[in-house]
Amino acid sequence: MKVSPELTSPVTLASWSAALREAITRTREKHPFTIEAWVLMPDHLHCIWTLQPGDSDFSTRWSLIKRRVSMALGERLHLEAWRSASKAKRRESTLRQRRCLEHTLRDETDFARCLDDIHFNPVKHGHVERVVDWPWSSFHRHLAVGFCAPDWAGDSSPGVFGEE
């Protein structure tokens, strides 16, 4: 999901996070999925989900999550200065892009590379110098269970992460 970059003052990352958490919880009640990794950035997010066997319907889940976040954040997302003519014509909010980029993970190596990219994203975009310093990331959950060390990628050196 990509949000407009201007959405940094009336909508804080804490309010984005709370709205997303509630939207995801409600969506998972009828459309279960597991969140393997997640990072919330000021203007976008990245995640890795695992759906139930035989289920590949990411789009319904995203649609429900986006709708619920839009409703939760309400008028803070509907400032006309943030809406393009195209969005106004389609009666869309300023919250999101029309499409999500979806990538099916091919194997464990692909999973590991995408996981690293997700967790490194706040450093890549210059928000923090160390991955552990970004609070809106599943990195902390992975750290708590021993999957990684607190100083993982802490030197801000670029790695070989993400799509190739």
Image: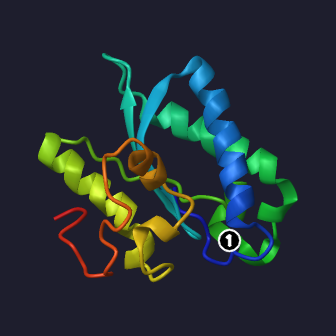
Depth check: give the residue in front, 16 or 69. 16
Q: Is residue 141 left or right of residue 86?
A: left
Which percent across, then down, holds residue 17? 66, 53
Q: Is residue 38 left or right of residue 41?
A: left
Residue 94 in view in this figure: no
Q: Is residue 70 left or right of residue 57?
A: right
Q: Amino acid at mark 1?
A: Ala
**Mark 1 — residue?**
85
Residue at left 41%, top 76%? 123
Residue 109 in view in this figure: yes
Which percent across, then down, holds residue 101? 37, 53
**Is 72 situated above or below 57?**
below
**Is 154 situated above or below 70?**
below
Residue at left 32%, top 58%? 149
Q: What residue occupies the far right of the structure in this picture?
A: 75
Residue at left 13%, top 48%? 109
Secondary structure of the residue carrying tag 1 is helix
Residue neighbourhood size for the residue with mark 1, other residues' Cα within 10 Å, grouped as few (<14), some (14–19), many (≥20): few
Residue at left 17%, top 69%? 160
